[in-house]
Image: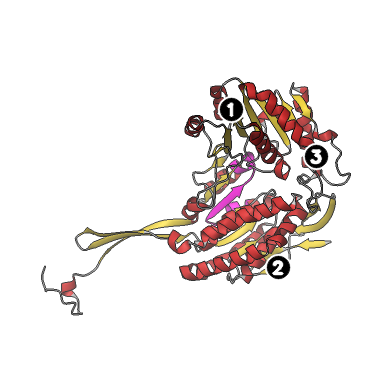
Amino acid sequence: MNHIAHWIGGAETAGTSGRVGPVFNPATGEQIASVDLANAAEIDAAVEAAKAAARGWREASLSKRSAVLFKFRELLASRTGELSAIVTREHGKVLADAAGEVARGLENVEFATGIPHLMKGNFSEQAATGVDVYSIRQPLGVVAGITPFNFPAMVPLWMCATAIASGNAFVLKPSEKDPSAALWLARLWQEAGLPDGVFTVVNGDKEAVDAILVHPDVAAVSFVGSTPIARYIYETGTSHGKRVQALGGAKNHMIVLPDAELDAAADAAISAGYGAAGERCMAISVVVAVGEIADPLVEAIAARLPKIKIGDGTDPASEMGPLISAQHRDKVAGYIEAGATQGATVVADGRADDLPKDGFFLGATLLDNVTPEMTVYTDEIFGPVLSVVRVDTYAEALQLVNDNEYGNGTAIFTRDGGAARQFQFDVNAGMVGVNVPIPVPVAYYSFGGWKASLFGDTHMYGPDGIHFYTRSKVVTSRWPDPGTSSVDLGFPQTR
């Protein structure tokens, strides 16, 4: 059985805490590895190594940093298949989803290669007589990322590419459920020429997280996960003087107006609701059907469900893989039962599907006539369960979205440009799609929600990422009058 260690100071480093956790292949249910779980002493050693490396990396020229990022980008692009296979083996998502995850992470690396431009400051000549004022951006030092199981390659790349390009040392605490992608990235950074210690991986659970949050030499923490944990990360980290960006949970709605193109909306509901088995913070979990489109839309979605090929993610024919664990699968299945008990119409029950006998599989589930009081509506299920809420008007649909505690992403399907523009003006969410079900921003914008989907005021990657991982310094300078210089500059002696 494979054993997964930490990566500290440019080398694999065995854990010393004596604690390990299991890593499973969700498609078979078999344990395929064990992973070391760090304690506070190991976190301290990792941060010390990162702190020592950060000093030299900060002094590296922007062109040197950019060269490393370009090399890393080329290596990652040429070996996408290798990383995708690692993600599929430990997370369970199909290879196409895993490759898409790597591609979105690659976009962030490409953005970060432009760091010589992104780190530009401002300059004001002659702010007063003989006085110039200018601003510069400087790295923070050691920064950390705490990342979720559902995107073990993409989310670390959201963070580390920008953080490292900005001149920081980055300490990654990946999910202990699928940690191998993080170690693979560490080796790739080393191959790209990144100095040892600038990228560190420490595996662990809550004990490791808490040690990071209170460590005096960690200047900032980035997090993606559930809302309760995001709130804890934000409150604990900021109370210890750190910058924190903590992205929380979601309950993403897709409004379908009566004039929408039916097949396009149904296809979008399938891909956005059941892709990666619904284990995405941007997954559509609620379809809001407005008026007369409700019946044909539900019928169109239901007709597509039997065509979804569920199986091992390594099978090219598979379109949806397993969930991350048996416990999570059973929790999601419990929501289906709760929905039926509370009055929802079970159009398709994923528990009844003909599923592989091994692994943590659950079929695609469709619930109709869901109301806002039901737990399938109020809770973030994080699984292949799609709920349909019926309303009569656009105003009711908008209120439904705006009243929800989450404000991560939302979408509207319509042929009416005026309605679409009004929606993006009215809706209280951080990311909006118009006939786009999963509106994840491209890398040169920034990712983040509103309300209970974000703690802190800075979104992730893109321009906000540069802002988060650097701080501004303003310099006011006055030089001696040229007429008093010991060097003959050709100026008159008096002005």
- Distance, label 2 to label 3, CA atoms, is 36 Å
Q: Earlier in the sequence, mark 2 or mark 1?
A: 2
Which residue is nearer to you in this view: 447 or 411? 411
Question: Which secondary structure, mark 3?
Answer: loop
Q: Which residue is mark 3?
A: 362
Graded by Cα atoms within 10 Å as few (under 14), some (14 to 19) or many (20 or more), the crowding at tag 1 reads many
Quadrant placement of the C terminus: bottom left
Question: Which residue is located at x 59 percent, y 72 percent?
Answer: 193
Q: Which residues are magenta?
A: 210-231
Q: Is residue 336 left or right of residue 407?
A: right
What colouring method underlies this structural image?
Answer: secondary structure
Relative vertical location of residue 413 with respect to residue 240 in this rendering, above or below? above
- In this rendering, position of residue 403 left or right of residue 294: left
Give the label, 2 or 1, closer to the camera. 1
Earlier in the chain: of badge 3 and badge 1, it is 1
**Residue at mark 2:** 12
**Disc 2 crowd, CA 10 A, few/some/many (<14, 14-19, 20+):** some
Q: Which of these two is toward me, 289 or 426?
A: 289
Q: Which mark is residue 257?
A: 1
